[in-house]
Image (cartoon, grey):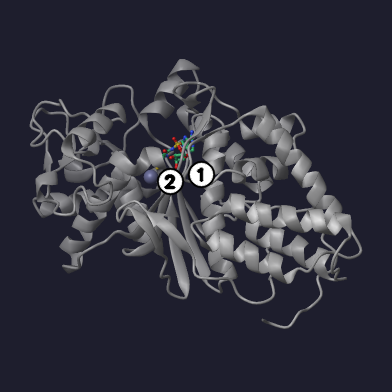
Amino acid sequence: MLSWPAPLLPTLPGTGSVLKVHDTARGEVVPTTPDRTARMYVCGITPYDATHLGHAATYLAFDLVNRVWRDAGHAVHYVQNVTDIDDPLLERADRDGEDWVVLAMRETALFREDMTALRVLPPEDYVGAVESIPRVVAHIETLLDEGLAYVLDDGTGDVYHDISQAPGFGSESRYDEATMLRFFAERGGDPDRAGKRQPLDPVLWRGARPGEPSWPGPRGTAGRPGWHIECAAIALDTIGMGFDVQGGGSDLIFPHHEYSAVHAEALTAAASGEKGPFARAYVHAAMIGLDGEKMSKSRGNLVFVSKLRGEGVDPMAIRLALLSGHYRTDRAWTPALLREAQERLGTWRRAVAQDTGAPAGPVLHGLRDRLADDLDSPGAIAVVDAWAAATIAGTGEQEEQAPAIVCDAVDALLGVALDSCAEAPALQDG
Ligand code: 5CA
Ligand code: ZN
């Protein structure tokens, strides 16, 4: 699929630090260990409605991962999917009397616009579920051939993964069985489906139902893919096993990321005997809420990025407002949060427009240090706040080049463009 245009990414003097992130599977903050090219997969939208601030916050968190890696000298191979066929999409299209393909295309186009406005670095591979179906089918055939998956015996053609043969199952979320069963039932699973070997077996292929779109499937059965195998297949076919970060919101810890991992690990073991893991770190962004509840399309308590943009809100203020909380803290969107970000943006813009500013070196160091430490964006913002205050006050040591350097650093590391930065002087490394 078409990705979106990349914003300019200023190169900063010196090099950033090694990024540490919280890995759900290990339950602690760990250093990332990318090769020259860092590899990241982030679960994309299901395009049946516009991008809300919860989605935006999650993509901004992983945009920081991308920026910190690049600043540390890595190339980044970033992959994101679009779940452009799924139950909620078909239900919404049905409700509104609209073609599901048109709905998905429109909302995906709007998402690209929102991401562009928020200056999110685009994925190198932006991949739709529908365009991946032939590869997904081949992967399901492999699992069937290996006896790791089975066709339900009720004439539907539905195929399930036999989770009793997946040794790594449970190691991503580390949930106990009762918790798994609860989330499985709440988040699209079917623990009570008759004929399954285990209640927690996930669907790989759903045989065609009347009135639903379908594609040629495994063992010649028309239908459509299960959700988790799509992300497993797309990641395997683009960045392969053992990539650095698997990302998404915390609502994907289970079942989605657990099953994507075991599908991919089973496929890799079948192909080469190689053992996992699917990802070296599973990183989850906390939930953005509104009025005391998680912002979600199914609850309908949404604030859309595109609506705010339409009202003339500066996307950089939206970006700053969402980054003013830590990515692992559940938090609420409030009008006050946006007002505070608008004021901060104004102050920062005034500061970088000064002829001289407080020394830039400590700002660069502070930004790098805070963001590399599990994406401490509130800490990073505080560093810039302090610099802006000292610069506007004009007290203490002042440097001529500081406003331009800080302007570039805020752009490159936080992704916040403060309008046109003055020509940043070429500095020596160090
Ligand atoms: N298409 C699947 C992933 S393969 C999906 O979950 N789509 S989504 O449109 O429901 O969500 C897109 C991304 O936003 C996911 O990473 C999800 O975890 C995240 N997300 C959803 N709601 C929120 C929220 N309220 N706060 C933060 N992140 C959220
Ligand atoms: Zn996914």
Q: Is residue 186 visible?
A: yes
The location of residue 335, given as percent across then percent down, is 67, 28
407 vs 203: above or below: below
Q: Which residue is mark 2?
A: 248
Please report the residue visible at 65 percent of the width from the left and 40 percent of the height from the top: 321
Which quadrant holds residue 391? Answer: bottom right
Give above or below for 404 relative to 166: below
Q: Residues within 10 Å of mark 2 (few under 14, many from 20)?
A: many
Residue 58's mark? 1
Name the residue nearer the viewer: 91 or 312.
312
Name which residue type carries label 1: Thr
- Are the residues tagged 1 and 2 within 8 Å (C-beta)? yes
Residue type at numbered disc 2: Gly
Q: Is mark 2 within 8 Å of ligand 1?
A: yes
Mark 1 sits near ligand 1, with its Cβ under 8 Å away: yes
User: Front-most of 373 and 414?
Assistant: 373
Q: Is residue 180 left or right of residue 245?
A: left
Residue 65 horizontal/vertical position (percent):
52, 58
